[in-house]
Image: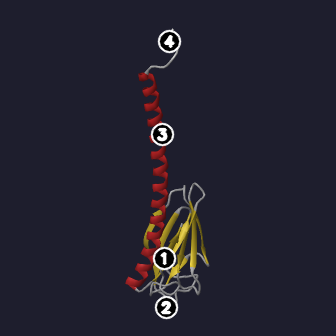
Amino acid sequence: MNRGFSLVEMLSVVAIISIVALIGFYNLGQQKSNSNDDIATIEDVFWRARNWARNHNVCTQIAIKGQTMTISSFIETDCSVPFKGALTFVFAVTIPVSTTLGAFTPSSPFIFNQNGGTIYNQPGTFVVTNAKGASTTFTVYPVIGQVRVKQ
């Protein structure tokens, strides 16, 4: 009576384990890629708002409602908060629920002035958290509106 495994049986088991492992690694890579896509999309929102303000000589604001980030513009001399006039819609994007959007600091909505800088005396920050709990901080510097991303 033969009690061992044949070479074909062992190779079959190794092949099945390899396939399962590859599927798992692919899914891990896909999740990281989706998270990076969300971060890139959020960074794009900041740059769009800043550039819209500079190119059109208007104030722009980024507002968050649920998972949607909306850029609106308004014409004002001092870009004061809160703006009470009519907003002009510029752009909106919905971020997947796997990414948690934080609040703007120092205030919400986040506002860029006509020069592309912010209306605040200190750098503004915005923190997002992905499904795994890793956070990314967006920092916008006041004078020039430079956006920095720290993961």
User: Could you tell me how far apart the alpha carbons at marks 1 and 2 are, in whole angstroms?
Assistant: 23 Å
Residue behind mark 1:
147
> Which of the numbered marks, if any, corresponds to residue 2?
4
Q: Residues within 10 Å of mark 3 (few under 14, many from 20)?
A: few
Residue corresponding to mark 2 = 77
User: In the image shown, does 97 or 136 lie closer to the viewer?
Assistant: 136
Query: How far is the residue under mark 4 from the one under mark 2?
Result: 90 Å
Nearer mark to the viewer, of 1 and 3: 3
Residue type at numbered disc 4:
Asn
Indicate which label's residue lies in the foreground, 4 or 1: 4
Residue pictured at 43% horizontal, 32% vertical: 15
Q: Residue furthest top?
A: 1
The residue positioned 47% from the left and 60% from the top of the image is: 36
Quote the CA–CA distance across marks 4 and 1. Answer: 69 Å
Viewer-side label of 1, 2: 1
**Label 4, label 3: how far apart the Cα atoms are:** 31 Å
- Can you give x and y, in whole percent of width and height, for residue 112 in the image? 49, 82
Say if mark 1 contacts mark 2, CB within 8 Å.
no
Measured in 3D between alpha carbons, the distance from the residue under mark 2 to the one under mark 3, in whole angstroms, is 59 Å
The amino acid on which the numbered mark 1 sits, given as a three-letter code, is Val
Q: Earlier in the sequence, mark 4 or mark 3?
A: 4
The residue at which mark 3 appears reads as: 21
| x 56%, y 62%: residue | 66
